[in-house]
Amino acid sequence: MIKKVFHRNGLRENGVITVEGTDFFYKSLPLVFFQKELNGYKILSKYYPVPNLIRIEKGDNTGLLVFEYENSVDTKKGLLINLFTNKKVKTEDFNPLLELYKKVFLKTLKKDKGKASDIFFKDRISTRLEKFYSPKFIKSINDKEVFLNGNKLKLQLEKTISTIKSFFKKDGLHWCVISQGDPNDLNLGLKPVLFDYEAAGWNPLMAEFANLFVYNLIQGSYLGPVYSKASYKRHKEIYKYLDKVRLSKNKLEHKTLSLRRKFVFMYIKKVLMPCFHKIENYNGWYEEFKNYFAMKILCRFDISKMPKKDMILSLCFLEYFYNTINPKSFNEFLSLTKKIWLVQR
């Protein structure tokens, strides 16, 4: 047996083991996360293409999951990230994945508490939000005026954090779907096939969208590769396509690849709008979206410890989408998003 470790962090480890010439993907996790991963896989496998799970082992402190290796991830169009590092890509390449989402979302859409992805949202109020942002830091940036891509903004972090906490104290029902829960470039195969199941299950529709939106807006081609380099060591091509970010005094300019914005807008039109048509009346959608959005901005990384340019960039997007705009429809949302989300090419 040959073992190749892709990523290791404490008791978490994943990689490939080769037995008699056949590759298998494995994940070793602390027991609580092992159980989440296993439960998520069981739910997701009923609706989405996933690799076959062929072995489960549970120890005293960790659990092991072994999957058939998905060979398509090694091709030029294996994972979603490959499309953002390929100059010859066509927007049509997104369609199989988007059609899969549309089919499953429409089939499973219902009111539910949707707690599967709480690990990225509600759970992080105490473990990250309250620990990352001290009163001293909040006071230091509160009420500062900055410009992002020509939009004048006044940072209101104290008010924002207070409102976020109030939102997540509620325990009501949301419009939910069966989803993977962490739709980033490295978890979505274009075959299509989905990976990583820790947050999979019943998730609020707006939590799933906020995850995908923030990732493509600021994390997938910028903050992720810069602040989580270990996750991208097998995808170093992404560093040739990083966002362009420039800060001059209190004026900031940020541009992403045009393909990222196109992908998100296609997702809205092909996946979310049909769901909204089925719901008919979803007046609270933006309040839900902006709170999930805010948690992904504030609690993926500790913004207070970033260099000024990246800290201001994150806080500007937070201010714009949380306090500045309040769209009533997705068409209005698209229009307002274009004002702040600029593209390179």
Image: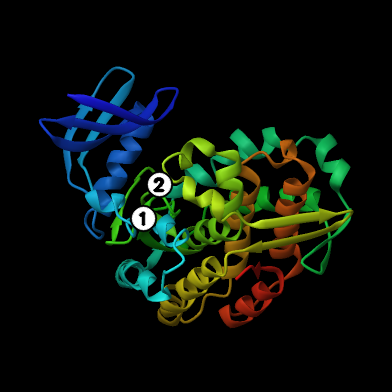
In the rendered image, the residue lying farthest to the left is 20
Question: Mark 2 sits on what residue?
Answer: 199
Q: Which label belongs to residue 53?
A: none
Neighbours of disc 1 within 10 Å: few (<14), some (14-19), many (20+): many
- Residue 228 seen anywhere in this rendered image of the structure: yes
In this picture, residue 222 sits left or right of residue 174: right
In the rendered image, the residue lying farthest to the top is 60
> Distance from label 2 to label 1 (Cα)?
19 Å
At 81% across and 54% down in the image, what residue appears? Answer: 247
Q: Name the quadrant containing residue 339.
A: bottom right
Neighbours of disc 2 within 10 Å: few (<14), some (14-19), many (20+): many
In the rendered image, the vertical position of residue 6 relative to residue 141, given as above or below = above
Q: Earlier in the sequence, mark 2 or mark 1?
A: 1
Give the residue type at disc 1: Leu
Question: Mark 1 sits on what residue?
Answer: 79
Give the residue type at disc 2: Ala
